[in-house]
Image (cartoon, rainbow, N blue to C red):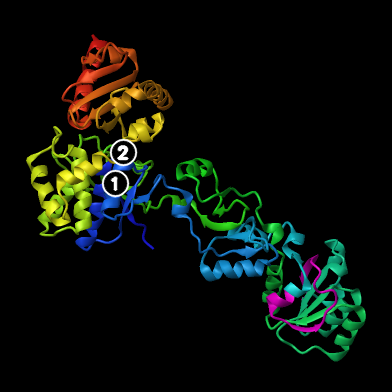
Amino acid sequence: MQSPTYIIGHKNPDADAICSAIAYAAFKEAIGEEGFVAARCGNSNARIDAILTKFKTPLPQFVGDVIPRVEDIMRTKVRKTHIGATCSEALELIDTYDIRSLPVVDKDDHVEGVVSVFDLGEFFIPKPNEPRKMRHVFASIDNIVKALEADVVTLSNSDRVEDLYVRIGAMDFRSFGRFTETEDIKPEQSIIVVGDRYDIQQRSIQSGVRLLVVTGGLEVESDVIEMAKSKGTCLIVSKFDSATTSWIIRTATDLAPLVDREVSTFNREEKLSSVRRRIAQSNAPIFCVVDENRRLEGIFTKTDLLKPVQTSLVLVDHNELGQAVNGAGEVNITEIVDHHRLGNPPTSQPIFFRNEIIGSTCSIIAELYRARGLEPSPQIAGVLMGGIISDTLNLKGPTTTDRDRYLLPWLAGIAGVEADTLADEIFSAGSIVVSETPDRVIIADCKHYEQGDIAYSVSQVEELGFNNFWNKAEQIQDALTAYQKEKGLTFSALLVTDINTQNSLLLVEGDETCIEQISFSPYNSKHNIFELPGIVSRKKQLIPYFTSLLRNIAVMAKS
């Protein structure tokens, strides 16, 4: 099954990030494009919940990260063999399914090791200077019978796995048996493969060989059968010729001694970047994926690591990797729909990129509906309204455009909701400063930025007045300091915006050189808290200010 394409907003999502993801997924469905799923990479808040509850829309699916992992490339339909299997059974699987290696498991599917065609080849390729190894079989008589599909004449202790040595009885009667002396092979360890050589058959039984195999499907004389029974010699008949029979007997060898038990195993959650480092110097043909109990779950090869990752993303309300879901830079970004400054990552292929000077990403989605001559459902129209109202402060913020002012009444008519009424419900849904812990206040709507060697964060909360903030100002300031140090940032800032007065307070913690350059007035001489009259937009007002400030600091540092 093909992986879905996640339509996802930025970390610490605000209403526009959540609402635009939901609405764009609905738009994709409306125009007949399948496989798109609205997603989020952060928690909701009271205002987002108020919007979605009002329009009976569930939160998007949570996707904590899209970092490529073993489970993204592993194969779960695995051909495997058992530790008690024979070489014959392993070879049959390798030949039937045209594979190079097999995981070897026990009766409970725990991984015992791996056997490859190379391991088997090393065993079966003749070694003229090691004649004993050329003849060696570690098997039970039962497994030899099974491999040959032989007719049984008489057997004795046939289930015992033992070291045996194969010999074709093609020599003259007078020289038969000398090999036991020259190769130090005892008769009770010998398997004699012979055709209709009555004299060799008798001599073999008389000498006490372990197994006599008559080839070509030939009938065995009754007195030979009686002699075998009396001597306790196993006697079977193979339908194959002597050369083929002797080779097949060797394939009945027990697989266990050939299994490579020094194998690296992985769990399905391991990151591919880590896996690549672990196996860089390995020549193993396959790698096993196991659960916490070492039970086999799948396999992968080095070739699988070269395959394109199937996960795809559509980024909405952001275009910078620093703000995107973790792992975004390692997967396919197929589209970006945004209204912020450019800081987009490079892509391997051309993509659809729509970046507009407009108050909300939800406004862009609404325009896509209109461009196609479509109307969103009342629920989606309401969700789009929520994103626009939240991002433009109900059309009062400095990022508001005439297009936003046109779109909001159009959506209100479809949703059957007055914009001002919805705005009151959204902004009175609850104070984040009151309902959340200080550290949650910092990360609820936090974005990271980079400029040269400087990395910084700007968080924003919107309140009805500043009273709630002042009640927890010291704790929030401590939390901002802790966040800046934890993330290793040059500085961290928090913009506290009063929706009623359209003014803000700015808290900044971190590098004093940067803070000293801030030209806004300190609030009542409080350290690192500044008054920002008329400043309500992080994107359009505060970030351009910081960009200019940091550029000036860089110039001063060089002079």
Of residues 540 and 147, which is closer to you in this image? 540
Identify the image quadrant of the C terminus.
Answer: top left
Q: Which residue is mark 2?
A: 430
Of residues 175 and 404, which is closer to you in this image? 404
The correct choice, above or below, for 238 with respect to 551 in the image is below
The reply to whether residue 128 is in sight is no
Q: Dot 2 lies on which element?
A: loop
Q: Amino acid at mark 2?
A: Gly
Of residues 278 and 519, which is closer to you in this image? 519
Q: Give the alpha-carbon distance from disc 2 to disc 1, as whole Å.
A: 9 Å
Asked whether 265 falls inside the magenta stretch, the response is: no
Q: Dot 1 lies on which element?
A: helix
Residue 481 percent coordinates (x, y): 39, 21
Neighbor class of circle 2 (other Cα within 10 Å; few <14, some 14-19, many 20+) is some
Residue 370 percent coordinates (x, y): 11, 55
Instruction: Say which residue appears at 21% left-offset and 32% top-offset.
Output: 499
Residue 15 percent coordinates (x, y): 26, 43
Q: Report the disc number at residue 50.
A: 1
